[in-house]
Image (tube, rainbow, N blue to C red):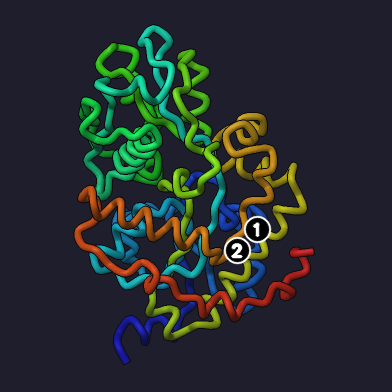
Amino acid sequence: MTTLAAQATACDALWYTRCPVPTALGIAVHRGWFDEEFGPDGITLNSLQETADAGKRESHFDHSLPHSFRQGGNIPALWARARGADTRVIGLSWTNEFQAIVTLPDRGIRSVRDLRGRRLGLPRHPISIDFWRAAALKGFLSALELEGLGHGDAEWVDLPDERERRTGPASFARGPHEYGIEIAALVRGEVDAVFVKGVEGLETVHLIDAQVVIDLGAHPDPLVRIGNGTPRTLTVDRALIDARPDLVSRFLSVVVGAGDWAARHPAETVAYIGRETRASDEWVRYAYGADVHRHLETGLAQTSIDGLVAFKDFLVEWGFLEQDFDARAWIDPAPFTRIDRQRHAWVA
């Protein structure tokens, strides 16, 4: 038996991490359901967001910590797998969100076609995997392709983050403002358009009276909407699946149950998402839709799988992943087939 397998068999603690976005995992944490599920067995649940250990925190990106689950943006999960992290996807979620190319009214940009020849800002951050840059490039290219344009039809401007890399629990965020670098460049006239998404992106649009050129999050084609958050991945280290499939399926069962619960409790769900995203209920509904509570389900829908594969191909093509791999084979459906949706009274 390998060391990792032996550790997994004797597991008395699990780790989890999630991004500050709408996730069923986040709902389950706020409701205390993981403690209810695993506490009676003497298994403790620990959050990477709350640890002071920098090595453990980095597992949010490289998924190096044994006995750990991660639900959130797919770029770090794909990056970790491409670098050799022995992880598996056990669930996918798809919550549509505001994803927009924005400009200022005085730039004369009224449509995507007007982006031809313009200066488009791409952030560059000194972090393990620059998922903000990847998301921005994908957003711009998706918009351009809708008008038959491509990468060569625009001028690309790097926007380097020259601040020292943050450490501590706050390192999961990007500092004072998520899009501060892009918006500063836009206001100073260094670029003509930038990409923003989510609650903070939408708030930024209103803060600077920006003009939305296109909201990709509202496009009817899901493959146009793919990005770091569509779909979101739920991953776990394979050693834990092999040694303790029961724990993996129980953890997944809680996440799936939380998504079921959210669909029946709209007001409470929006409030929890607000706590996760540091936004008011109104902004949550504005950025993620009035029916966001119905879109926290975790499963293995074919649309989500296809979106993950397509986005992985994009990341490989543009050099964000060190090597290619079979994203469909990365998905392990076995834990999902073993979940018990009737196990918890709170699902009803």
Q: Residue at x 35, y 19 (%)?
A: 114
Provide residue 263's location: percent of width, then percent of height. 72, 53
Q: Residue at x 60, y 81 (%)?
A: 338
The answer to whether 187 appears left or right of 22 in the picture is left
Above/below status of 166 relative to 195: below
Label 1 vs label 2: CA separation?
6 Å
Q: Are marks 1 and 2 in contact (CB under 8 Å)?
A: yes
Q: Residue at x 61, y 43 (%)?
A: 273
Q: Amino acid at mark 2?
A: Val
Provide residue 279's location: percent of width, then percent of height. 58, 33
Q: Quadrant of residue 192?
A: top left
The answer to whether 278 appears left or right of 175 in the picture is right
Secondary structure, mark 1, is helix
Q: Which mark is residue 73?
A: none
In the displayed orientation, state which residue is furthest to the front.
148
Above/below status of 97 relative to 183: below
The answer to whether 82 appears left or right of 196 in the picture is left
In the displayed orientation, state which residue is furthest to the bottom.
1
Above/below status of 110 relative to 134: above
Provide residue 247's location: percent of width, then percent of height. 54, 78
Which residue occupies the foreground of this view, 39 or 246? 246
Q: Amino acid at mark 1?
A: Gly
Mark 2 Cα-neighbour bin, 10 Å: few <14, some 14–19, many ≥20? many
Q: What residue does disc 1 label?
A: 259
Which residue occupies the foreground of this view, 109 or 297? 109
Secondary structure, mark 2, is helix
Mark 1 Cα-neighbour bin, 10 Å: few <14, some 14–19, many ≥20? many
Quadrant position of the C terminus in the picture: bottom right
For the question of whether residue 53 can be seen, the reply is no
Q: What residue does disc 2 label?
A: 255
Provide residue 145's location: percent of width, then percent of height. 35, 37
